Image (spheres, grey):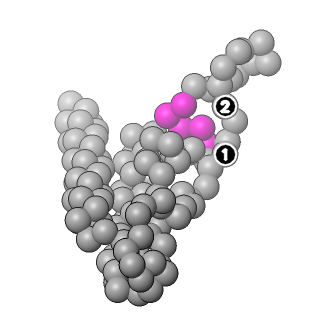
């Protein structure tokens, strides 16, 4: 029943992205003292979200439509961040990683709030 509702797919994808971002932040913090370690990061959810079925995007139902997309998507790929290095070559800034961690938590909380709100609207609609 919930598989065909776009809002649930979008909020699930947002929560997964936040989890990926938190995992990369944890890896960066764990390697904060590793010489020559280059910090990694993820692009924002907005830049990476490409639903597999075109959910949440304009859909082209005819060939005459100018805009619209077909299915396509992938998990976000991590990239190397370009920060200043310390004398041992490490590029991890603990302050920056703390801010990224807070942003990931907020994104996850936002995804859960969207999911819960959509679920409450669906429940109240069903109850009549």
Q: Can see residue 124?
A: yes
Nearer to the camera, 101 or 68:
101
Q: Position of residue 37 (x, y in %)?
A: 47, 79
From this view, report whether residue 31 is shown above or below residue 59: below
Nearer to the camera, 23 or 116:
23
Dots 1, 2 in contact, CB < 8 A:
yes
Q: Position of residue 123 (x, y in %)?
A: 23, 41
* Residue at 69%, 36% in the rendered image: 70
Give the prevailing secondary structure in the magenta stretch: loop
Rendering quarter of residue 68:
top right
From this view, report whether residue 2 is shown above or below residue 105: above
**Which secondary structure, mark 2?**
loop
Q: Position of residue 83 (x, y in %)?
A: 42, 61
Residue at the disc numbered 1:
72
Q: Position of residue 60 (x, y in %)?
A: 68, 23
On screen, residue 99 versus residue 50, left or right, reads: left
Real-space Cα separation, disc 1 to disc 2, in angstroms: 8 Å
Q: Can see residue 123?
A: no
Q: Which residues are magenta?
A: 53-57
- Whether residue 20 appears in magenta in the rendering, the answer is no
How many numbered callouts? 2
Most distant residue in the top direction:
64
Residue at the disc numbered 2:
69
Most distant residue in the bottom direction:
34
Q: Please tell me the numbered disc located at residue 12.
A: none
* Residue at 31%, 68% in the rendered image: 93
Q: Residues within 10 Å of mark 1 (few under 14, many from 20)?
A: few
* Residue at 61%, 55% in the rendered image: 74
Q: Residues within 10 Å of mark 2 (few under 14, many from 20)?
A: some
Q: Quadrant of the C terminus?
A: top left
């Amino acid at each position: 029943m919930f598989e065909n509702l776009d809002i649930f797919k979008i909020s699930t994808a947002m929560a997964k992205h936040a989890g990926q971002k938190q995992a990369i932040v944890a890896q960066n913090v764990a390697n904060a003292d590793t010489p020559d370690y280059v910090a990694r990061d993820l692009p924002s959810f907005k830049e990476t979200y490409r639903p597999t079925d075109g959910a949440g995007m304009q859909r082209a139902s005819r060939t005459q439509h100018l805009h619209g997309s077909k299915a396509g998507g992938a998990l976000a790929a991590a990239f190397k961040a370009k920060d200043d290095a310390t004398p041992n070559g490490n590029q991890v800034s603990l302050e920056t990683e703390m801010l990224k961690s807070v942003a990931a938590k907020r994104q996850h909380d936002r995804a859960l709030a969207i999911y819960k709100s959509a679920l409450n609207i669906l429940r109240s609609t069903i109850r009549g």
